[in-house]
Amino acid sequence: MAKRYSKEFLKMLRNEIPIAILICDLLKLENKVSEGYFRFSCPICSGFNTATSQKTNLARCFRCEKNFNPIDMVMEVKRVGFIDAVEYLNEIVSCRSELKKMFAENELEFSLNLFESI
Ligand SMILES: [Zn+2]
């Protein structure tokens, strides 16, 4: 039987890890800052016509016209199903001390580079 996750749990997972940190530090997608905005290489088209929103914690590719939440992003990059993506993120969230360390190192940089409104 497939595991079932509560809505609250999935919502927590989608919001607990900043999307830019997921993209750079965890999934190690190619990324760069262009025109002052953080851009990542889209896992579908490899383009950099992308942005992230701190407010909604979503990443968007303007070329594919697709939004990715952290679960979508893991599924696409790692080519795994929903449950594997959820378990991957859950493991990361469980290692809170690691995450906090990353925050401390990257907070300033990300607050400067993130594209606020998609
Ligand atoms: Zn794309």
Image: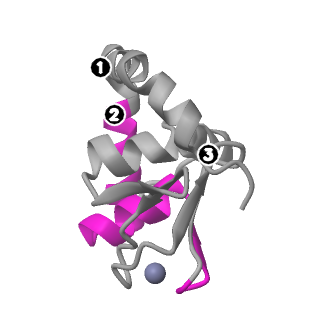
Mark 1 or mark 3, which has the lower sequence index? 3
Question: Which residue is at 59% across, 79% downward?
Answer: 62
- Tell me the tag on residue 92: 2
Q: How far apart in space, not on screen, are marks 2 and 3 (Cα)?
A: 18 Å
Vertical placement of residue 24 versus 85, above or below = above
Q: Is residue 53 left or right of residue 63?
A: right
N-terminal of the pair, mark 2 or mark 3, is 3
x then y, percent, for residue 3: 43, 55
| Mark 2, secondary structure of its residue | helix
Q: Where is residue 72 in the image (x, y as percent from the top left)?
A: 47, 65
Residue lying at 46% horizontally and 46% vertically, measured from the top left: 20
**What residue does disc 1 label?**
98
Q: Where is residue 25 in the image (x, y as percent from the top left)?
A: 29, 41
User: Are circles 2 and 1 on residues that touch, CB within 8 Å?
Assistant: yes
Q: Say which of 18 and 83 sits in front.
A: 18
Label 1 vs label 3, nearer the camera:
1
| Residue range of the region highlighted in magenta in the rendering | 63-92
Gap in angstroms between the C-alphas marked 2 and 1: 8 Å
Residue 16 visible in rendering: no
Q: Is mark 3 within 8 Å of ligand 1?
A: no
Hey, what amino acid is under mark 3?
A: Ser
Q: Is residue 13 magenta?
A: no
State the image quarter where residue 42 is shown: bottom left
Horizontal side of 9 relative to 94 (left or right) equals right
Instruction: Report the mark closest to the observer, 2 or 1.
Output: 1
Residue designated by label 3: 6
Which color scheme did the rendering employ for the protein?
Answer: one colour
Q: What residue type is labelled 1?
A: Glu
